[in-house]
Amino acid sequence: MRLAVWDPDEPFRRWRDALVQHAGELHLSVDVIDAGAEPDEQADFALVWKPPQAWLAGQQQLRAVFNLGAGVDAVLPLMRSHAPGVPLIRLEDAGMGRQMADYVCEAVLHAWRRMDDYAALQAHATWEPLVLPARTGFHIGLLGLGHMGMAAARRLRDLEFPLLACTRSGAPRAPGEFDGPLYDIQRLPEFLARCRVLVVLLPLTDETRRLLDYATLRQLPRGAYLINAGRGSVLDQDDLADLVEEGHLSGATLDVFDPEPLPAGHRLWRMPRVRITPHVAAQTLVGPSAAQVMHKIAAIERGETPGGVVDPRLGY
C-alpha cells in the first residue's frame, strides 16, 4: 500500500521513518511518499495537515484520509468537495491529551492563584498578599467534552476542583465517564452562570462558529476567567477584549485565534490580563501519531471500522 504525507510543519523523513517502523511491527508493507515533493503520485491512504485543494482533488484512489491534528475543520470542507465518500479519520489523543491537560491545568491554577493580580501589584512595587478563592466554590466549566476535554477533566478532578460540562447532547460519550453536572447546549446560559473558569474545547462547526460573542460571554459571572484551546473561530475576539477591558471578565488564556497568527496590531497583544500562546496547547507528536495511524490502517485492512471516523454531518 502507498501512504502519502502532506505536513509542511514536520520533516518528511520523520513521518516516513516512524510509519515504516510501526508498519513493520504490524507486519504491513508500506511505501511512504512525500506528497509535497511528489504531488502527482497516487496513494491508498493520506496523512494530511491543511493539504492544498488541488492535491486532494487529484488523488483518485484514496481509501481513507487521516487528519494530523485534533480538529478537522480545515480539511473537512475539502473532503466534502473533492473526496466525497472517502472516510476522514482524526487522531484520538496520540499524546495530545496529556499536553492539553497540562495546558488547561496551568491556566486554571494561574486564574485560581490570582497571578494576574500579583503581576499588576508587581508593576507598582506593591507587596500585598491576596485572599485565595475557596477551591470548593471555584467551579471549572468545560465547554466541549471530547478526547481533549476528558483529558483535561481527569487532571482537574485530581486537583480537586468542582467540574461541570456542556456538550451538544448533554450526555457523556460513555456511561459514568463524567460525574459532574452535564448540560446540553440548549442550557448554555445556565451552564455559563456557574463557571468561575470557562474552558473552551469545542470543535468548529456551523453551530459553534462565533458561539461565544459579547451577549453569550456576558452570561459568565463577573470576574470569571476564560481559556480557549479549541478553535479560534468559536470565540469573538473583539467581544472578549471588550469584556476584559470592562472588568466583567478577569482575564483569559488564549491558544487559538481567527486568523492565525493573531495580527500584530490586535489589541489582545497589549492586554496584560490576556495571555497568548501560538496554537501549542496540544501539538501533534510524530511517534505516537504514526503508531495510531498504522493501527487504524491495520483495522481497515482487516475489514474493521477504526475509531475516530468523522461524521461529516456533525463536523467531528
Image: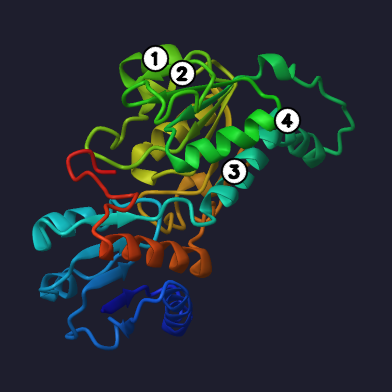
Residue name at image x 70 percent, y 35 percent:
109
Say which quarter of the image contains residue 3: bottom left
- Local SS, label 2: helix
- Local SS, label 4: loop
Please tell me which of labels 1 and 3 falls first in the chain.
Answer: 3
- Local SS, label 1: helix
Rendered image: mark on residue 114: 4
Instruction: Determine whether 199 is above or below 95 in the image.
Output: above
Q: Position of residue 21 (x, y in %)?
A: 48, 79
Please tell me which of labels 4 and 3 falls first in the chain.
Answer: 3
Amino acid identity at mark 3 = Ala
Give the Cα separation between the discs numbered 3 and 2: 21 Å
Q: Count residues near mark 2 (Cα–Cα under 10 Å), then give few for <14, some for 14-19, many for 20+.
A: many
Question: 161 or 300, which lies in front?
Answer: 300
Residue name at image x 24 percent, y 43 percent:
315
Give the Cα separation between the discs numbered 4 and 3: 20 Å
Amino acid identity at mark 2 = Leu
Rendered image: mark on residue 189: 1
Please tell me which of labels 2 and 4 falls first in the chain.
Answer: 4
Left/right placement of residue 195 relative to residue 131 reads left
- State yes or no: discs 1 and 2 in contact (Cβ < 8 Å): yes
- State yes or no: discs 3 and 2 in contact (Cβ < 8 Å): no
- Camera-near label (4 vs 3) is 3
**Residue bearing mark 3:** 101
- Local SS, label 3: helix
Give the Cα separation between the discs numbered 4 and 1: 25 Å
Give the Cα separation between the discs numbered 1 and 2: 5 Å
**Residue bearing mark 2:** 192
Q: Count residues near mark 1 (Cα–Cα under 10 Å), then give few for <14, some for 14-19, many for 20+.
A: some
